[in-house]
Image (spheres, grey):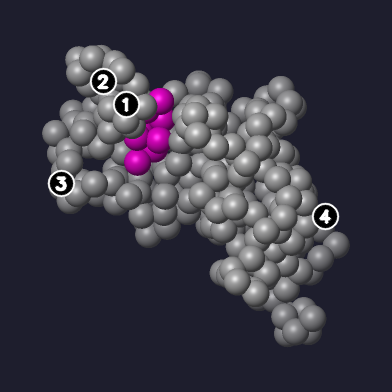
């Protein structure tokens, strides 16, 4: 990990109509790290991720991807910027009528001029990276939930992005399958040098994969805490943060504050 910021979020505010989800949020993500966004339901985790990948325009502030403002980029500049990132959505979002190979090949058909044989070769390579070699001709309905998540990661890697965004990758998975997915994320981060931004509230996954985390809070409408999971568990001055990382019941007086 170089310590060089590859993503910089500056004074970001998100609103739905008159409702403010979070405001004045600032942080950076370093190249090569696994950065986790966490927090309770309704705090804006997925909303923040969607701002970071350019799906939503901020009410205020900026998201810089390698020095370029993704919310302001348009036309060919935006297209080039989007090629640098890969996204895995919570459901996996695989096309049910397509095989795994066809799903992974789709970004290559959309964004490159590679011949068909080369597209197939790249898609097979990405599936091999997530240990799905031999499943190229399977439909999503024919594989397990964990395999669907890994296939979605393979598709997110199709264009060789250096930034991968994962929205609740462990959601709906049993503990063993979730641990296998965590292992895949760590292996890809270590061997390929990919920077991961992961939205999750799964505590076991957070401890397993996170280099750093930020914790969003609905009451604060912003970042409640940041650091390593161990720092927040052992040294946070906020009882809500400590309770989260220790998986304890939050005291009633803290809940109401």
Lower sequence index among marks 1 and 4: 1
Foreground residue among 234 and 159: 159
Mark 3 vs mark 1: in front: 1
Lower sequence index among marks 2 and 1: 1
Q: Which mark is residue 34?
A: none
Q: In the image, is residue 153 part of the stretch drawn in magenta?
A: yes
Foreground residue among 62 and 49: 62
Mark 2 vs mark 4: in front: 2
Residue highlighted by disc 2: 119
Assign the magenta stretch its main secondary structure.
helix
Residue at 57 percent across and 58 percent down: it is: 47
Q: Which mark is residue 97?
A: 3
Q: CA distance from mark 2 to mark 1?
A: 6 Å
Foreground residue among 91 and 21: 21
Q: Residues within 10 Å of mark 2 (few under 14, many from 20)?
A: many
Residue highlighted by disc 1: 108
Q: Is residue 55 visible?
A: yes
Residue at 17 percent across and 41 percent down: it is: 98
Residues under numbered marks 3 and 4 in contact, where contact means CB atoms less than 8 Å apart: no
The relative height of residue 168 versus residue 243 in the rendered view (above or below) is above
Residue projecting furthest to the front: 75
Residues under numbered marks 2 and 1 in contact, where contact means CB atoms less than 8 Å apart: yes
């Amino acid at each position: 990990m170089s310590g060089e910021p590859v993503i910089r979020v500056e004074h970001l505010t998100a609103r739905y109509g008159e409702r403010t989800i979070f405001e004045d949020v600032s942080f950076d993500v370093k190249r090569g790290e696994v950065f986790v966004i966490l927090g309770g339901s309704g705090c804006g985790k997925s909303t923040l991720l969607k701002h970071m990948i350019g799906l939503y325009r901020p009410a205020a502030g900026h998201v810089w991807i390698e020095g370029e403002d993704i919310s302001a980029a348009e036309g060919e500049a935006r297209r080039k910027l989007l090629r640098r990132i890969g996204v895995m959505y919570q459901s996996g979002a695989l096309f049910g009528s397509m095989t795994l190979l066809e799903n992974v090949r789709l970004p290559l058909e959309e964004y490159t001029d590679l011949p068909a044989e080369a597209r197939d070769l790249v898609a097979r390579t990405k599936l091999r990276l997530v240990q799905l070699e031999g499943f190229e001709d399977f439909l999503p309905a024919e594989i397990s939930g964990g395999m669907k998540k890994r296939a979605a990661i393979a598709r997110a890697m199709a264009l060789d992005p250096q930034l991968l965004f994962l929205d609740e990758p462990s959601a709906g998975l049993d503990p063993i399958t979730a641990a296998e997915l965590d292992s895949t994320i760590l292996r890809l981060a270590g061997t390929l040098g990919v920077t991961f931004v992961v939205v999750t509230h799964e505590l076991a996954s957070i401890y397993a994969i996170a280099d750093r985390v930020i914790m969003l809070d609905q009451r604060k409408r912003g970042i409640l805490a940041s650091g390593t999971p161990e720092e927040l568990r052992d040294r946070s001055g906020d009882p809500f943060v400590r309770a989260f990382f220790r998986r304890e019941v939050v005291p009633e007086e803290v809940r109401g504050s």
